[in-house]
Image: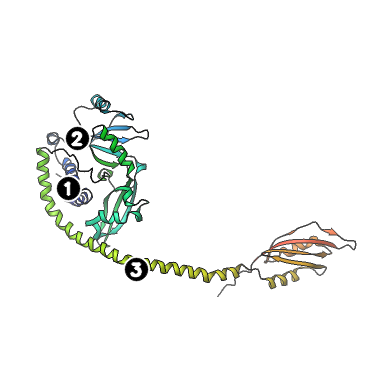
Amino acid sequence: MKSLRPNIAAAQDALHRFGLPQLLDWWLEQLRLLLPSRLLRLAGFQRGRLQCRPLADGGFQIGLRRPGENPLEIGRLSPGAGREQLESLLQARVQGRPRTGVELILPADACFCRPVTLPLATEANLGQVLRYEMDRHTPFPANRVYHAWEVLRRDASAGRLQVALVVVPRERVDEPLAQLRTLGLEVRRAIPEQLPLEQAQSRWFNLLPRDETGAGRPRPGRAQLAVASLVAALLVTLLLPLWQHRAISIQYLDELRALAPQVSRLSAAQDRREQLREALEAPLRAREAQVPATELLAEITRLLPDHTWLTSLRLEGRELHLEGDSAAASALIEALEDSPLLANVRFLASVQRRGDGRERFTLGAEALPAAAEETP
């Protein structure tokens, strides 16, 4: 028989997430793995539970999940179908009555899942901490979603806790819940179809509203009452460390609230520092972008041949305009392109030859800022 000790931590997680009713469901599932098939039949574990997956057209895909088996596809329930159609579908495909309470299977695109790392001291009050920081870890506020979680890893040496957090918009749960009620079905769990995190088990993420998870539960049989007594005895050993962690978590939340004004002031100071740095760096950037007019004039004087005269020189931003006459205007572009201060040298108008043999030209070029000097 398998050891129960590795499951104690998982039982604590189930108690934190759902409370005593769902902890009983979890423990019964674990017990099923330990019992022979004869006892499972006596306890009613092998009847299976219906699974309802909402479809895009408003209908449902109906399946049956039995312990230790792959889900059985029963059929499709069309939109607007009533109890008679459901009963007819079950009688045709299922032997015996399924267990009371169905599972609502939420499509993968309806759920948002991500890992969250928190201080280890928050474990005893994990639900409250996740609700408090919901808008920081997900794109949704806490009042717009239903959420569930599972502890993935505890790092006692680092004092950290890694949690898989799953949220679903409330309308993606409320609408199919209302439809299933009209069919006379009691939904026991709303679980994701699949999760992107390999460590997380989607079956234990119950995304039902809190007021739905325990309402209308059937009375357990004798075998389940015996198991419940065993669970109650185990809870005595589980609750003591939970209460100890609870006090630490409450203290942690109080400290977070006390630090909130200091964090706000620090954030405002950082914003002011960034604004001041931008104001100080703006003149430097503007100076670096300026074209050095004196260096540019000296460079043009050096590059133009002696037979070339300028009658006009204009610098508009970075656009340089040169007008004049030369004995060989076609050679000016090649001469000016050798300068690191000029780029895109070109004629802005056709060259005009005068009667004395000289050529009238109009040139344009892009003036470049001087390269910043490297500091040794």
Please give the residue where the numbered disc 1 appears in the rendered image.
20
Q: CA distance from mark 1 to mark 3?
A: 39 Å
Q: CA distance from mark 3 to mark 2?
A: 53 Å
Specify whether residue 70 is in view: no
* Secondary element at image label 3: helix
From the viewer's perspective, is the residue at label 3 or at label 2 nearer? 3
**The quadrant where residue 267 appears:** bottom left
Residue kind at label 3, given as amino acid type: Gln
**The quadrant where residue 256 appears:** bottom left
The residue at the point 77 percent across, 63 percent down is 332
Please give the residue where the numbered disc 2 appears in the rendered image.
100
Q: How is the image coloured?
A: rainbow
Q: Which label's residue is closer to the chain start, 3 or 2?
A: 2
Q: Which label's residue is closer to the chain start, 1 or 2?
A: 1
Nearer to me, 226 or 182: 182
Q: Residue 33, percent across and down?
A: 18, 41
Please give the residue where the numbered disc 3 appears in the rendered image.
262
